Amino acid sequence: MDRRFVLLATTAAAAATANADLTYTTVEAPIYPGELNHAQILGNIFGGAFGANGLDYTNGAIDVMRVADDGADGIIDLLEGASSDAEDQFWGDSFGVSLRLEAKYAADSAILGWKDGTSGGVFNPLIETGNLGDSIFVSLTDEFRWALNDTTTGVFVTSNPNDQMLNDAPVDQMVAYHVTGVGEPGNTWVIFFEDRIGGDYDFNDAVFQLTVVPSPGGVALLAMGGLVLIRRRR
Ligand SMILES: [Ca+2]
Ligand SMILES: [Ca+2]
Ligand SMILES: [Ca+2]
């Protein structure tokens, strides 16, 4: 066999294997009356009727792409990232992110926050799940986990399944989507938390939209740089 062909075939097989390793946590249909599923919640956030396309959703203009839950090591870049970059366990932010509470279909109260690094660390609270529409603008570190403190049970969970155990095995408590087509600068994500370990896994207990834009300071510096360039050219 031609040696070049063997190399190509090996590369193709490796790529296929990498894709086959991606796994996605199952999102169960809500079992309690009045609770909405992901398509319905996305419709409330972005407008229009969202239909499923595999694990992704679209309303025809806005595409909501599911991020893998395992099988692609790496850090998701909040500003530049896309759904296919890495699994949803670790996130990084060099600029700033606006978080907005979009939905809460849960009896428990909770606080969204984050923990620095890939394990351990202290819980940094950001926003409570009590008031829909509440938002906050924060700058985070270049490697962190999203975390949810269920204040009813006193239990913390994070986007890293290894941070919590169910029947002696790591368990996933958060799924995420990358959103394109919203027509704004920056990058948009939606994250859906399951609050209780061993809960119903409808992943609608705390839902947050993340809008990531370069910081106002960064934009101002860019503008000043442009001004200097213009003056020099005169
Ligand atoms: Ca996950
Ligand atoms: Ca629920
Ligand atoms: Ca739940």
Image: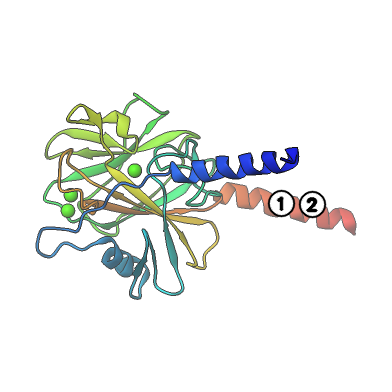
Q: Residue furthest front?
A: 1
Front-most of residues 165 and 144: 165
Q: Amino acid at mark 1?
A: Met
Q: Position of residue 164 (x, y in %)?
A: 25, 31
**Coloring scheme of the render?**
rainbow
The residue located at (47%, 33%) in the rendering is: 143
- x and y percent of residue 48 in the render? 35, 75
Q: Quadrant of residue 170?
A: top left
Label 2 to label 1, Cα distance in Å? Answer: 6 Å
Q: Secondary structure at mark 2?
A: helix
Compare residues 43 and 170 and report the one nearer the observer. 170
Vertical relation: 69 (above or below) 47:
above
Whether 95 is drawn above or below 52: the answer is above
- Relative to residue 164, is residue 144 drawn left or right? right
Q: Secondary structure at mark 1?
A: helix
> Could you tell me which quadrant the N terminus lies in?
top right
Disc 2 CB within 8 Å of nearest ligand 1 atom: no
Residue bearing mark 2: 228
The residue located at (15%, 33%) in the rendering is 154
Q: Residue furthest top?
A: 120
**How crowded is the residue under tag 2: few (<14 C-alpha within 10 Å), some, or many (20+)?**
few
Q: Is mark 1 within 8 Å of ligand 1?
A: no
Q: Nearer the viewer, residue 225 or 58?
A: 58
Residue 205: x and y, percent? 21, 51
- Callout 2 amino acid: Val
Residue holding disc 1? 224
Q: Is residue 123 visible?
A: no
The picture places residue 47, in percent across and down from the top left corner, at 35, 73
Look at the numbered discs 2 and 1 and tell me whether their residues touch, using CB distance below 8 Å.
yes
